[in-house]
Amino acid sequence: MELDLKQLKYAVSLAEEKKGKDIILLNLKGISLVTDYFLLATGNSVIQVKAIASHFKEKLPEVGIPVLREEGLPEATWVLIDCGDLVVHVMTPETREFYNIERLWGDAEVMSL
């Protein structure tokens, strides 16, 4: 399933609705065989990470983005939501800084929506 720009904008808006910080959408087409996009967001606490992740799980299917798997609960320092062509990463500030996914995928285009 190919995601369109409207679906991607909606996904970004979900993180914004729950006050996620440092929201970045990476275009991994041609770089990754696993997925086309990474959506990264930071929650200020484990509770906020859980809230953001829960919001994604509830709302993404409404626009045709399936939630296939979720990893990282109940600890919730890094919750990964696998939606096939989109993988959502919601992390605490410490976890995001430590793993620095943006650097690992430095070849990916940062999309501005």
Image (cartoon, rainbow, N blue to C red):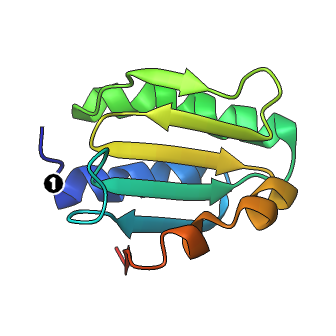
Q: Is residue 28 visible?
A: yes
Q: What element carries label 1?
A: loop
Q: Who is closer to the viewer here, 79 or 106?
A: 106
Q: Mark 1 points at which residue?
A: 4
Residue 63 in the image, given as x and y percentages of width and height:
25, 35
Neighbour class for label 1 at 10 Å: few (<14), some, many (≥20)?
few
Q: Residue 36 placed where, x, y %? A: 27, 54
In the rendered view, tell whether residue 67 sits above or below residue 88: above
- Residue 55, quarter of picture: top right
* Placement of the C terminus among the 4 image quadrants: bottom left
User: Relative to residue 12, is residue 75 depicted above or below?
Assistant: above
Q: Which x, y percent locates residue 22?
A: 64, 69
Residue drawn where x is 49% and y is 26% of the image? 57
* Amino acid type shown at disc 1: Asp
Q: In this view, does 4 lie above or below 73?
A: below
Residue 16: tell me if it is visible. Answer: no
Residue at horizontal 31 percent and vertical 44 percent from the top: 34
| Image-quadrant location for residue 98 | bottom right
Foreground pick, 17 / 95: 95
**How many marks do you count on the picture?**
1
Residue 57 shown left or right of residue 74 in the figure: left
User: What residue lies at 43% left-to-right and 65% top-to-bottom?
Assistant: 25
- Determine whether, in the image, residue 63 is placed left or right of residue 89: left
Residue at horizontal 31 percent and vertical 56 percent from the top: 32
